[in-house]
Image: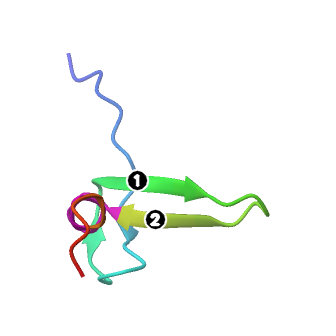
């Protein structure tokens, strides 16, 4: 009953942490970047 699809582990481009909880960003010129949830939360809250 394990039908959950797991995302591959990637390295965050901001904090260099390996994680499977991330946001995939795609720029207009087709460059992908991986940002972990922690860094994304900090960005959403305007922390530096």
Asked whether residue 30 is drawn in magenta, I would say no
Dividing the picture into quadrants, the one containing residue 48 is bottom left
Residue 43 image point, x, y percent: 30, 66
Q: Earlier in the sequence, mark 1 or mark 2?
A: 1
Residue at the spot 28% in from the left edge and 27% down from the top edge: 4
Residue at the spot 69% in from the left edge and 66% down from the top edge: 31
The stretch of residues the image draws in magenta is: 36-42
Q: Nearer the viewer, residue 7 or 32?
A: 32
Residue 33 image point, x, y percent: 54, 67
Q: Main secondary structure of the magenta part?
A: helix
Which residue carries the number 1 mark?
Answer: 23
Q: Nearer the viewer, residue 8 or 14?
A: 14
Crowd band around label 1 with a 10 angstrom C-alpha radius: few (<14), some (14–19), many (20+): some
Which residue carries the number 2 mark?
Answer: 34
Dividing the picture into quadrants, the one containing residue 1 is top left
Q: Using the numbered discs, state the Cα–Cα distance from disc 1 to disc 2 in whole angstroms.
A: 6 Å
Residue 3 image point, x, y percent: 29, 21
Q: Furthest-front residue in view?
A: 46
Position of 30 compared to 33: left or right? right
Residue 30 position (above or below residue 1): below
Q: Nearer the viewer, residue 31 or 28?
A: 28
Q: Which color mode does the image show?
A: rainbow
């Amino acid at each position: 009953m394990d039908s959950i699809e797991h995302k591959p582990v990637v390295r965050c481009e901001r904090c260099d942490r390996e994680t499977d909880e991330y946001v995939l960003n795609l720029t207009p010129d087709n460059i992908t970047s991986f940002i972990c949830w922690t860094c994304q939360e900090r960005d959403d809250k305007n922390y530096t």
